[in-house]
Amino acid sequence: MILLVNACVRKESRTRKLAEAFLSEKDRPVTELCLNELVFPSANEAFLAKRDGLILAGHYDDPLFDLARQFASADEIVIAAPYWDLSFPAVLKQYFEQINVIGITFRYTPEGIPEGLCRARLLTYITTAGGTVVPGEYGFGYVKALAQNFYGIPEVRQIRAIGLDMIRTYECPFTGTAEDALLIESDELRIRYFMQSDLPKMLKWLTDDRVLGFYEGRDVRYTPETLAEDYLEKIPDGFRMIIEYRGEPIGYAQAYQLSGEMFEEYDYPDHGETVFAMDQFIGVPACWNQGIGTAFLRLMAAYLESCKGADCILLDPHQNNRRAIRAYEKAGFRIVRSLPAHELFEGKKEDCWLMERRRKC
Ligand SMILES: Cc1cc2nc3c(=O)[nH]c(=O)nc-3n(C[C@H](O)[C@H](O)[C@H](O)COP(=O)(O)O)c2cc1C
């Protein structure tokens, strides 16, 4: 059982939606605990005395310990908490005060060192922040320290999307700092806005025939000037991104919201939904066939769905690009229809598939 500890407050919480998108990839049952629906007892002196008495008497089946027992027995923990005042909503701290029970979630060794008693091997902390100055030490850092030092959960990961309340009118290239440029990150994968300093890397990728064979075409000859002209141009209703893996830029993506005749171009009905389309490539061949493309698409789709209100995301791979289609299917996209002679590529009009992923959260 996966335990979702939901510390989100708002009805339309983006953090909650991001957690849902993340959990929709899992095939195990999820038990959700909405912290805002609980009434926590005051951790006052009487409460502490009662709790100490129950622990001393070994009455671990007392209802006072229900939350601690539930946490200790979960196979996997997911915590969804918005970024509030450099950490998280107070209700999550109240929750930790309830579940930190000696004899259930941890114990002390004779040397006085805490030792975890929880079954989970993985805790994923999911957060979203309004701004871009988002130090992690009091939020994620605190939860990670608790999980590893007290509960004995060895693997602790974070998924975070930032800058969601800022009006980041996207100019191309993005002119803020590298930290400001972050959109979303998870483990070793980071998606950020494209910046002018990315142009040399892009030139390397887009003059490599192995890459051009899938993106743009091997008849394309970029110079620094023509590349800058093409990739510094703003995309209407969209933005350009760099994909980083283990701290290194490895690929490029662009996403844009469909409007007007773009629906016809994709042969997709305009029912007033928020529909995004995306193009992407991994420019480092050594990173192909490792599941990075799938992981990128899952993360990006979760971002567009939870933080940008996407009802649906479209892709249009060449029909003969089997590797890409397989990766897209693994990321929750499915083929909807054929788009004959859809894209001019190496002098020929290529047939493409229209693929869609619909929002589940
Ligand atoms: C009480 C409160 C405190 C907040 N503190 C911060 C903060 O310190 N830094 C920041 O970047 N955003 C802050 N925000 C903005 C939230 O992080 C942002 O709106 C987040 O996406 C909310 O998540 P939700 O959509 O799941 O509610 C705060 C919001 C609230 C309501």
Image (cartoon, helix red, strand yellow):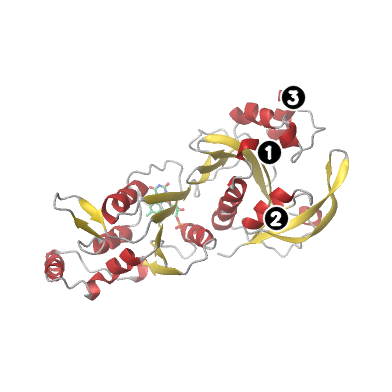
In the picture, the quarter occupied by the C terminus is bottom right
* Mark drawn on residue 338: none
Identity of the residue furthest to the top in this view: 224
User: Relative to 185, is 214 on the left or the right?
Assistant: right
Mark 3 or 1, closer to the camera? 3
Label 3 to label 1: alpha-carbon separation: 19 Å
Residue type, mark 2 in image: Leu
* Mark drawn on residue 314: 2
Which badge, 3 or 1, comes first in the chain's sequence? 3
Between 6 and 290, the residue placed more toward the observer is 290
Q: Quick one: SS at disc 1?
A: loop
Label 3 to label 2: alpha-carbon separation: 30 Å
Between 9 and 158, the residue placed more toward the observer is 158
* Mark 1 close to ligand 1, CB under 8 Å: no
Residue at numbered disc 1: 234
Check the image and report above or below for 8 versus 202: below
Residue at numbered disc 3: 223
Mark 2 or 1, closer to the camera? 2
Which badge, 2 or 1, comes first in the chain's sequence? 1
The residue at the point 26 percent across, 53 percent down is 150
Which badge, 3 or 2, comes first in the chain's sequence? 3
Residue 123: x and y in percent read: 39, 55
Label 2 to label 1: alpha-carbon separation: 20 Å
In the picture, the quarter occupied by the N terminus is bottom left
Residue 64: x and y in percent read: 23, 72
Residue type, mark 3 in image: Thr
Asked if one can make out residue 284 in the rendered structure from this viewpoint, the answer is no
Residue 120 picture quarter: bottom left
The residue at the point 77 percent across, 60 percent down is 268
Crowd tier of the residue under label 2, counting other residues whose Cα lies within 10 Å: few below 14, some 14–19, many 20 or above: many
Residue type, mark 1 in image: Lys
